[in-house]
Amino acid sequence: MKQLEIKDLSAAELQEKLSQLNKTYADLKAAHTISPIENPLQLRSVRRGIARINTELTKRELQ
């Protein structure tokens, strides 16, 4: 998810997307622990998406 897409979402949509990404990350991490997943770079992209959303939420709180 790109930064431009994140800026267009409302706070409620960001919270929903954040919970969805956290669940996806937990599932991927568990699957990777049991047996290596085909593309381990998925973990990095999901983790960065979570960080982008958290950054945007913090930025909005400070304004």
Image: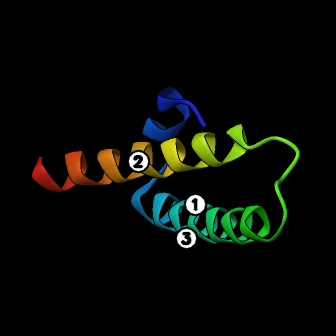
| Residue 51, numbered circle | 2
Where does label 3 land, which residue?
Answer: 19
Res. 28 image quadrant = bottom right
| Label 1: which secondary element | helix
Where does label 1 land, which residue?
Answer: 17
Q: Who comes first in sequence, dot 1 or dot 2? A: 1
Q: Amino acid at mark 1?
A: Lys
The total of numbered circles placed on residues is 3
The correct choice, above or below, for 30 with respect to 62 in the image is below
* Image coords of residue 38 (percent x, y): 88, 45
Task: Pick whichever, 17 or 11, lies toward us.
Answer: 17
Judge from the rendering whether residue 18 lies leftward or rightward of residue 25; answer left or right: left
* Image coords of residue 31 (percent x, y): 79, 67
Q: Amino acid at mark 2?
A: Ala
Q: Residue at x 51, y 62 (%)?
A: 18
| Residue 9, numbered circle | none
